[in-house]
Amino acid sequence: PGDVARIRPILIHELAHAFILAMAPRGLPLWFQEGLAKHFEGAPTSGAEAYLERHGGSFPRTLQGLNGGLRGRGGSVEASYLAALLAVRLIIDEEGFWTVRRVLESVGKGVPFEEAFREETRLETLEFQERWLSSLP
């Protein structure tokens, strides 16, 4: 039972990636993919916020930079995953999960991410980035 409990979130995370890539095989930024996979994994935002509060300066402060942080280039990879989770959760909290789904579907049809994001959220990614940054602990 202990092994199953430890591996379950990992399996859910990787299965989420399979579904995300089936819907949009290319064109999604890494922060969006990883944040969404962490969301499906069931990672709690309270734990993410507490971790980031303790390690505040350990991840990039732009969405573009977060893509590098997730690849181990710039700050803590773990903090970058949690920051990506909080970015996706902010979208879900403000716009609803269907917005995320429609972004995935649009990108899957070949619409550039920036355009799909703007269409569904009515925000430029830089505007969203400011909201995301101001929501962080």
Image (cartoon, helix red, strand yellow):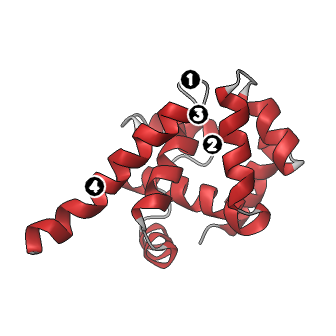
Distance between the alpha carbons at the discs numbered 2 and 1: 18 Å
Report helix, strand or loop for mark 1: loop
User: Label 3 to label 2, Cα distance in Å?
Assistant: 9 Å
Three-letter code, disc 3 = Pro
Quadrant hosting residue 8 = bottom left
Q: Residue beneath label 4, please?
A: 10
Residues at discs 3 and 4 in contact (Cβ within 8 Å): no
Q: Are marks 3 and 2 in contact (CB under 8 Å)?
A: yes
- Mark 3–mark 4 distance (CA, rounded to whole Å): 21 Å
What is the CA distance from the residue labelled 1 to the residue labelled 3? Answer: 9 Å
Residue type at mark 4 is Ile
- Image x and y of residue 104, in percent: 65, 39
Q: Position of residue 37 (x, y in %)?
A: 45, 51
Identify residue for label 2: 63
* In front of the other: 69 or 120: 120
Q: Residues within 10 Å of mark 4 (few under 14, many from 20)?
A: some
Q: Secondary structure at mark 4?
A: helix
What residue is shown at x 41% (from left), y 38% (from top)?
Answer: 18
Nearer the viewer's eye, disc 2 or disc 4? 4
What number is the disc on residue 128? none
Mark 2, residues whose alpha carbon is within 10 Å: few (<14), some, or many (≥20)? Answer: many
In this rendering, which labeled residue sits more in front, label 3 or label 2?
Answer: 3
Q: Is residue 134 above or below residue 115?
A: below
Answer yes or no: do the residues labelled 2 and 1 have beta carbons within 8 Å? no
Q: Is residue 43 left or right of residue 103?
A: left
Residue drawn where x is 51% and y is 39% of the image? 20
Q: Which residue is at a point 46% across and 69% down the rendered structure image?
A: 48
Q: Nearer the viewer, residue 77 or 16?
A: 16
Residue at numbered disc 1: 26
